Image: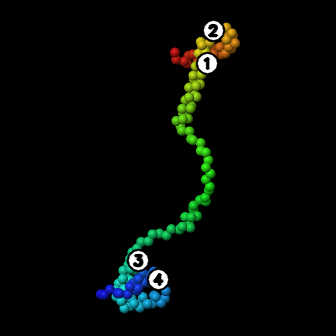
Amino acid sequence: MNKCIDTEIQEMLPDLIHESLDGSERRRVEAHLATCESCQEDLDVLRTVKGAAVFAPTIDTDRVVRQIPPYRMIVPGVEQPQRTRMVSWLVAAAVALAIVGGGTMMIDRPRCLPSVGSVRASSHSWVETCARLFQVFSPLMIH
């Protein structure tokens, strides 16, 4: 079999398969196919390839665009640094240590008072309060 030399007809074969030829061109290609065995074989190959081709699914771009949320202007603000859990525990531990240390100092305060009479006289009620606290908490303290 001889290869067809009419390249214009050969270039129109894919358009014939996709039905994109106008009436006069279509009749011209079909008339040529009736007499040319080489072009008939090329057309059969193109139909086989078209039938075997797997096409990607179409994407509904309108649906995708509808699902995009509307634009909101982002206003920059001052972000507060987030406190980590470790920092929170350290702050709590420092507060607890300050309370325990302050309580210990209050309990030991009667021993630390100077022996000057005027100071003892003016802080007599405070000394009594500390002494009472000392009596209550002394069994709990480790000596």
The mark closer to the camera, 2 or 3, is 2
Q: Determine if residue 74 is in view.
A: yes
In the picture, the disc for residue 139 is none
Do labels 3 and 4 touch, CB within 8 Å?
A: no
* Residue at the spot 51% in from the left edge and 68% down from the top edge: 59
Q: Position of residue 51 (x, y in %)?
A: 40, 77
Viewer-closest of 48 and 22: 22
* Label 2 – label 4 distance at C-alpha: 117 Å
Identify the residue under disc 4: 19
Rendered-image quadrant of the N terminus: bottom left
What is the C-alpha distance between the residues marked 2 and 1? 17 Å
> Does the image show residue 124?
no
Asked whether the residues under the numbered discs 2 and 4 touch, taking CB atoms below 8 Å apart as contact, a structural biologist would say: no
Q: What amino acid is labelled 4 in the image? A: Glu
Question: Residue at label 3?
Answer: 50
Q: Amino acid at mark 3?
A: Lys
- Density class for disc 3 (Cα within 10 Å; few <14, some 14-19, many ≥20) is some
Residue 106, numbered label: 1
Image point (36%, 80%), residue name: 45
